[in-house]
Amino acid sequence: MTDEALLKLKTLHVGAPSPEARKLALNAAMVAFEDAQSKRPRAAATGVMDAPKRWFSNRWNLGAALAGLGTVTAAVVLLPLGTQYATMNSRAPSVDKPLATTVATSTAPVSTNAAGGTVSLQVEEGGKTALKQPVMEKPMPPKDAVPVAANAPATESDEARLAVTSDALAAMPAAPTAKIAGQVAMRSGVANMEAPTVAPMASTSLGYAAMEPSGDSFQKFDENRVKITKDEPVSTFSIDVDTASYSYVRGLIEAGSLPEPDAVRLEEMINYFPYDYPAPATADTPFKATMQVFPTPWNKKTQLLEIGIKGYVQPPSERKPEALTFLIDTSGSMDEPNKLPLLKRSFSLLVDNLQPSDTVSIVTYAGSAGLVLKPTKASDKAAILSALDNLEAGGSTAGAEGIELAYQVAAQNKVADGVNRVILATDGDFNVGIDTPDELKTFIKSKRDEGISLSVLGFGRGNLDDALMQALAQNGNGNASYIDNLHEAQKVLVEEAGSTFITIAKDVKVQVEFNPAQVSEYRLIGYETRALNREDFNNDAVDAGEIGEGHTVTALYEITPAGSGADLNDPLRYGSSAQATGVSDELGFLKLRYKAPDGDVSKLITAPITKDLVTDDVAKVGNDQRFAAAVAAFGQKLKGSLYGTGMSWQGIIDLANGAKGADPDGYRAEFVQLVKLTSALSPDHGGVAVPSDAPPPPSVEPPSID
Amino acid sequence: MDGILAFAPQTGERPAPNAAAQQSAALVNRAKAGDRAAFAELIETHYDFIYRCACKWTGKKSDAEDIAQEVCIKLATAIQQFDGRSAFTSWLYRVTLNMVRDMQRARGRRDRNVDAFSLVHPEDDPGDQEDSTAAKEIWMAVSALPDKQREAIMLVYGEDMSHAEAGVIMGCKEATVSWHVHEAKKTLRGLL
């Protein structure tokens, strides 16, 4: 009788797996395979291996799983542009970017960094070109064979390493060119991300060789180039109030590493700091724009046009109720001090500062999924804080619960005339229950149209999907921040909670038309990832950034006054070289479009850029302007910009120091310290860089099946 | 290389047993040597198998997907430990079962919506629908058994294996399997 019943088990029919899951699994397996292969002794390289950009699907579902493997970039041979071989850990920046070559061997110990941070062997090359040198087409090849033996703690691996790379590198020029003076610092053995990079940084972006593949991924972009006003008089972009780039860069530098260029977004660095622009008097016009033109600190012949926008500040009595839904990543990878524990404390700070009429709900995903706290009034702080406290990191993926649940909760508890926002906090695992990023963006967009916006908070390193964070925040009419420490949490979630959560204008676009008679060339500093087409400005269907309460937004243009002789472009030989004769002596015209938070039709604000806004003396310009310029200079130098790297670190420090002003929160002083740290990590003029003192990491056994 | 038949995917198409076994063996060896394409093919070929196995054991599609993915990742390193003593698919089955066990231990075997089993459509065969509901109930009961008994029952009855074949996967002697089956039936007798 039982047998008969049991035989029914055979009849249970299982359907086919979903093609998406299959693909993801295959991708994940290949990554793990390549990973594993790199750790094994190899008689010879098996030739060219291409690395499709699979970082995204890796992160999509893996998170904690890969953290267990150790996201090791050990097996990578990254070669500069122009050579064919590029194998890389898919989390490293893309192949077409010249990077430090990392050479690994099986015998080199590999540390499984519980953070899931990537670790890599590095051949770092000090490339130092004289500052005046033109941009190089091809970055310097690394000096590999000789220095390998130099200060390698793992000796027997050298032969293996050389064997592995010998054919791969055979095609490469043997030594760097004579022009390059610099140190080649070789650090074999695996260094974890926290160890300081050793090579001095080249001053051009193509020669930038000092960074480590971090495991964090950023949207790639090319720096804005100088434009000729006659050819392209109009510049259009969306404002950006995110500050994630600055805090991320700060975190990295304080840990002793230099960021990759794509991580340095100049507009976010500049916008991190509060500026004292005049605010609008009433909420009728939600923001006010002021402009100034003054000499460029790094270029005597050009000028900086600074556009400063300040959002309306609500008086406290007008504060509307907020309904906030925290959507928290509780996957295994969050189990690090700078992730879930920091997140808990950050949210506690926020909760402590809410008003009794505010509501908080908590949904978790990727670990213990589901509704952790029903919508609770902020008057019952104890319940909220206790729910936060009980959060644990663990588990890998949770399937369908997650973002849909969070928005459901948010929708059910929507406050009519207030702030309705989902706050997504993660270290990079976006497996919130919607499978593809495009679907996720669409979902978020539809919710924001229903009145629920999204803020994204990033924590930790090694898993960060900054590009996706930015994309989601943009689609959600919200903002993206990176929380590296409690101070930052204080800033984003308490001091600037108004700007973070209360939107006063949305889809804010900037358009500037320059007058070729006055300005022959211009260059927008930053905002590369927010560029808009000229026609997008008047097209209300095109999404743009939001301004929060009290936000300040700064945009800088470096402009070449007509006739100054500072033009980078020669005049045309065959075209008409006559100067455009405009009737006006305005430098240009500023246009801003915005929509009310609930509105769909944009409104326009305009202002001419007149000559009375110009000052010839940097000293006469206010602290805010000079400080913004210092931050711009720092960012440009840090990312190896094609322009404006002429200033020394000390020059930037002096400029910033002189522009600190009252600095009540100490952000500007902190910035100065940051520049000092950076100058130690990457000194000007080939000074001695900070030596690496990373201890050799422990070795790891591959997992065995029981 | 016995036992391949029992693990053929339920698509209905079964390659000749020896050919499949040989193909697997060759691929495995190449993959162990570091041949990326071979490894990729191995995963492609066996993904469905792993997924279905995980489905049958967890009863939940999303869990099965997670487990299948984890197994694929693990294979990258674990493959080095496959020594060819058993059929590749037997070994793979074991790896998958271990992963199921790990996941269920980590998450707690909560009773969740069992969605992995497709029901028979009433149009196709009205009689069958009762059968499949009953099957599901039996599955739930079996799932509640202690690990070894559950494995023995699922392999012998669910996968139609001999006790010897099941022993290969469970890593124990044929007689041990029989004993587990016997014990399991004692427990189930009360429920069925």
Image (cartoon, coloured by chain):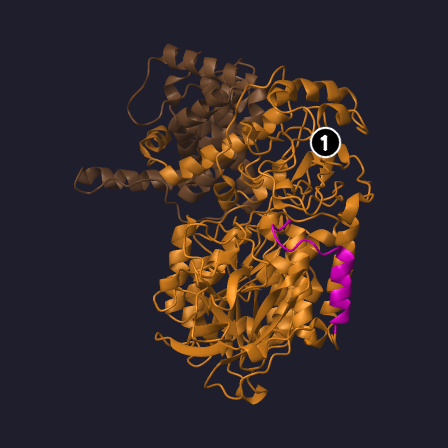
Q: Quadrant of residue B159?
A: top left
The answer to whether residue A339 is seen in the rendering is no
Asked whether A346 or A47 is in front, the reply is A47
Residue appearing at x 73%, y 29% in the figure: A109
- Region in magenta: A640-660
Q: Residues within 10 Å of mark 1 (few under 14, many from 20)?
A: few
- Look at mark 1 in the image and give the residue it sits on: A178
Residue appearing at x 39%, y 78% in the figure: A603
- Secondary structure, mark 1, is loop
Asked whether A254 or A382 is in front, the reply is A254
Residue A296 image point, x, y percent? 65, 64
Asked whether B63 or A642 is in front, the reply is A642
Horizontal relation, residue B183 to residue A200: left or right: left
Residue A559 image point, x, y percent? 56, 64
Q: Tell me: residue B190, above or below residue A42.
A: below
Q: Tell me: residue A299, above or below residue B44.
A: below
Asked whether A460 or B20 is in front, the reply is A460
Residue appearing at x 67%, y 40% in the figure: A209
Of all chains, the one bearing label 1 is A
Horizontal relation, residue A693 to residue A250: left or right: right
Q: Quadrant of residue A179?
A: top right
The answer to whether residue A621 is seen in the rendering is yes
**What colour denotes chain A?**
orange
Residue appearing at x 61%, y 73% in the figure: A496
**Is A652 colored magenta in this rendering?**
yes
Residue B173 image point, x, y percent? 54, 17
Residue A617 image point, x, y percent? 69, 73
**Position of the C terminus of chain A by quadrant:** top right
**Position of the N terminus of chain A by quadrant:** top left
For badge 1, the amino acid type reads Ala
* Chain colored brown: B
